Image (spheres, rainbow, N blue to C red):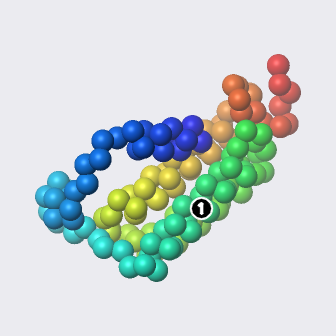
Amino acid sequence: LEALVFSSEIIRNLPKNEKTNDEIQKIIDPKIKYYNLSKIQEKTLNKTKKSIKKLMWRNVGIVRRENELKEALIELEKLKHEFQKTFNNKVNEKIIEIQNLLTVGNLITKAALKRKKSLGGHFLSVIPVP
């Protein structure tokens, strides 16, 4: 969650250095073509991003419950599967952003499940807070 919050702040403070698709293509692997999204695909990506944010806040927020964490892992896997069916092997900054959100969400959720004691601002509701 912290990564999601602070990444927005970092992006806002980056210098504006817009690159064209051709310039981006020169930077990335030449075998991979930069993918231009349709309006429908952009809407799909925006919807997926919102779904990830809501899921992480609802199930992996400050108060964490084991059953909700497990539900989040299942839902993240479903979102990843649907996402890969549509956008696998395509390169675009929005596609990469969603891939990163899915990966980070999965890692945070797995780490929260493995943690057996409450630390900092997050805690498992079944474990007494010291």
How many circles with numbers are drawn on the protein? 1
Q: Which residue is mark 1?
A: 50
Which is nearer the eye, 94 or 83?
94
> Residue drawn at (73%, 52%), measured in percent from left and top?
58
Q: Is residue 16 visible?
A: yes
Relative to 109, residue 93 above or below: below
Q: Residues within 10 Å of mark 1 (few under 14, many from 20)?
A: few
Q: Quarter-wise, where is residue 5 in the image?
A: top right
Which is nearer the eye, 126 or 23?
23
Q: Quadrant of the C terminus?
A: top right
* Horizontal relation, residue 34 to residue 112: left or right: left
Q: State the image coordinates of residue 71 (x, y, percent, origin top left).
A: 71, 57
* Horizontal relation, residue 23 to residue 64: left or right: left
> Residue drawn at (43%, 56%), measured in percent from left and top?
97
Q: State the image coordinates of residue 95 (x, y, percent, origin top left).
A: 40, 63
Which is nearer the eye, 36 or 31?
36
> Residue drawn at (70%, 43%), measured in percent from left and top?
61
Q: Quarter-wise, where is residue 123 in the image?
A: top right
> Residue drawn at (48%, 68%), measured in percent from left and top?
45
Asked which secondary structure carries label 1, the reply is: helix
Q: State the image coordinates of residue 12 (x, y, percent, origin top left).
A: 42, 43
Q: Is residue 25 visible?
A: no
